[in-house]
Image (cartoon, rainbow, N blue to C red):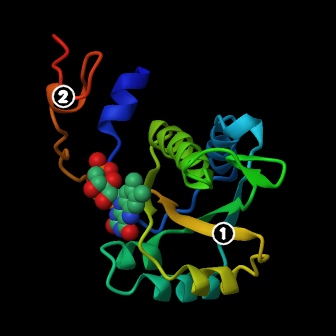
Amino acid sequence: MDILQIIASRRAIRRYSQFKVEPEKLYQVLEAARWAPSWKNSQCARVVIVEDTEIKKRIAEALKGNRSYDGALEAPVILVICAEKGLSGYSGSSPVTDKAEWFMFDTGVYAQNLMLAAHQLGLGTVIIGYFDSNLVAREICLPQDYAAVALLLLGYPAEQPRSTPRKPLEATVFLNRFGEPYPL
Ligand SMILES: Cc1cc2nc3c(=O)[nH]c(=O)nc-3n(C[C@H](O)[C@H](O)[C@H](O)COP(=O)(O)O)c2cc1C
């Protein structure tokens, strides 16, 4: 598959088979994430690979009411995407843009690299933003100067979700001024 096909055919996977993720495939997806761009190449992203059944069960409790709750119980691996705070978007100890922290952006790019590489290898993922991050931080013993940003479930898909719609380009792409159509 070429890169555009990989991007367009990736789907959020919320049901997982019990097949384990081979260590060499896990290594490859982590390696893809490692090459993600970041603010001033400051590389604030960290990932905690959770494979321990008891810790996974307790992390799933942080997902009560989430569409991915069942998937979190099934997936062989839960990746906790974390960020070192006060680094991305900063020059020294001061934020330098009107958006202060940029770690959500850096970890988003990091996660997307990981998800696309996983999809190419036949693995499924879903990124989860709606969870109790304090509970997760406690479970993984996260230091105070880090944020638990997102969870990624990783494993072999037990479903083939239908394609999800996207807005047409003309609704989101403009020429020179916001709202002015770009002739596509
Ligand atoms: C920042 C972010 C947070 C998300 N949080 C959740 C979540 O908490 N639970 C969930 O099931 N899916 C979550 N998703 C997955 C989206 O629902 C999914 O990507 C979207 O519906 C499009 O579907 P697709 O990825 O299959 O194309 C999240 C996606 C993003 C980018």
- Name the residue at the right extreme: 92
- The quarter of the image holding the N terminus is top left
Number of other residues with Cα within 10 Å of mark 2, as a class: few under 14, some 14 to 19, many 20 or more: few
Q: Residue at position x 61%, y 44% from top?
A: 97
Of helix, strand and loop, which one carries label 2?
loop
Residue under label 1:
147
Q: Position of residue 92 (x, y in %)?
A: 84, 49
- Name the residue at the top extreme: 183
Vertical relation: 181 (above or below) 44: above
Image quadrant in which you'd find residue 168: top left
Q: Residue at position x 54%, y 68% from top?
A: 76
Vertical relation: 105 (above or below) 46: above
Residue under label 2:
179
Which amino acid lies under the numbered mark 2 shown in the image of this protein? Gly
- The quarter of the image holding the C terminus is top left
Residue at disc 2, CB closer than 8 Å to ligand 1: no
Vertical relation: 168 (above or below) 93: above
Mark 1 vs 2, N-terminal side: 1
Tag 1 and tag 2, C-beta contact below 8 Å = no
Number of other residues with Cα within 10 Å of mark 1, as a class: few under 14, some 14 to 19, many 20 or more: many
Image quadrant of ligand 1 equals: bottom left
Which amino acid lies under the numbered mark 1 shown in the image of this protein? Ala
Q: Position of residue 47 (x, y in %)?
A: 69, 60
Q: Residue at position x 55%, y 42% from top?
A: 109
Image quadrant in which you'd find residue 134: bottom right
Q: Which of marks 1 and 2 is in front?
A: 2
Q: Position of residue 83 (x, y in %)?
A: 68, 60
